[in-house]
Image (cartoon, rainbow, N blue to C red):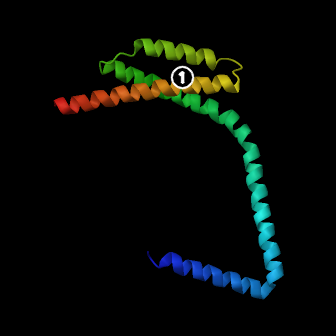
């Protein structure tokens, strides 16, 4: 094991001892506990904001997945793979789910549909490219 982490641990522990000596051991422990409590409250506050972030993050991911799906499908069709029916079906289902006043559940379903479609088309394009490389 390299000695750098060990040296760093000893330096930090000596600094902690110096702080405890200068400010007093009891005050240092109280301040450290207050820092732990403050950090826990900050993490709790951040976690309470997650539902609001997810409310805008999931639709954004769904739209991004759909934007990736369409050109991937077109490239896959041009490469000689099947994909016309997938383009029509995934686009229709996505637009129905992500339509006007879509709920979180509908956006999540739209994300799953578009994401799965984009992954399938990516796999088809990669398989086609590997077949072309092996043949050439």
Judge whether 10 appears above or below 136 on screen: below
Q: How many discs appear?
A: 1
The answer to whether 133 appears left or right of 38 in the picture is left
Residue closer to the observer: 130 or 13: 13
Quarter-of-image position of residue 23: bottom right
Q: Residue furthest left?
A: 136
Quarter-of-image position of residue 86: top left
Residue 113 rendering spot, x and y as whole percentages: 54, 23
Q: On the rendered image, what quadrant is the N terminus found in?
A: bottom left
Residue 18 rendering spot, x and y as whole percentages: 71, 86
Residue closer to the observer: 43 or 79: 43
Judge whether 30 appears above or below 63 on screen: below
The answer to whether 8 appears left or right of 134 in the picture is right
Residue 120 rendering spot, x and y as whole percentages: 42, 25
SS at badge 1: helix
Q: Residue at x 61, y 14 (%)?
A: 96
Q: Residue at x 77, y 50 (%)?
A: 45
Judge whether 101 appears above or below 12 on screen: above
**How crowded is the residue under tag 1: few (<14 C-alpha within 10 Å), some, or many (20+)?**
many
Q: Residue at x 68, y 37 (%)?
A: 54
The answer to whether 4 appears left or right of 129 in the picture is right
Q: On the rendered image, what quadrant is the C terminus found in?
A: top left
Q: Residue at x 52, y 24 (%)?
A: 114
Quarter-of-image position of residue 83: top left
Residue closer to the observer: 12 or 79: 12
Residue 89 rendering spot, x and y as whole percentages: 50, 13
The residue carrying mark 1 is: 113
């Amino acid at each position: 094991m390299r000695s750098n982490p060990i040296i760093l641990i000893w330096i930090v522990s000596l600094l902690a001892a110096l702080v405890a000596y200068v400010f007093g051991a009891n005050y240092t422990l109280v301040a450290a506990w207050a820092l732990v409590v403050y950090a826990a409250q900050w993490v709790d506050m951040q976690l309470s904001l997650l539902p609001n972030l997810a409310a805008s993050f999931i639709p954004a991911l769904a739209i991004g997945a759909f934007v990736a799906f369409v050109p991937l499908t077109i490239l896959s069709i041009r490469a000689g793979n099947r994909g016309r029916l997938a383009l029509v079906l995934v686009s229709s289902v996505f637009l129905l789910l992500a339509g006007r006043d879509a709920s979180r559940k509908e956006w999540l379903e739209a994300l799953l549909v578009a994401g799965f479609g984009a992954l399938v088309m990516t796999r088809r394009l990669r398989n086609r490219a590997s077949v072309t490389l092996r043949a050439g």
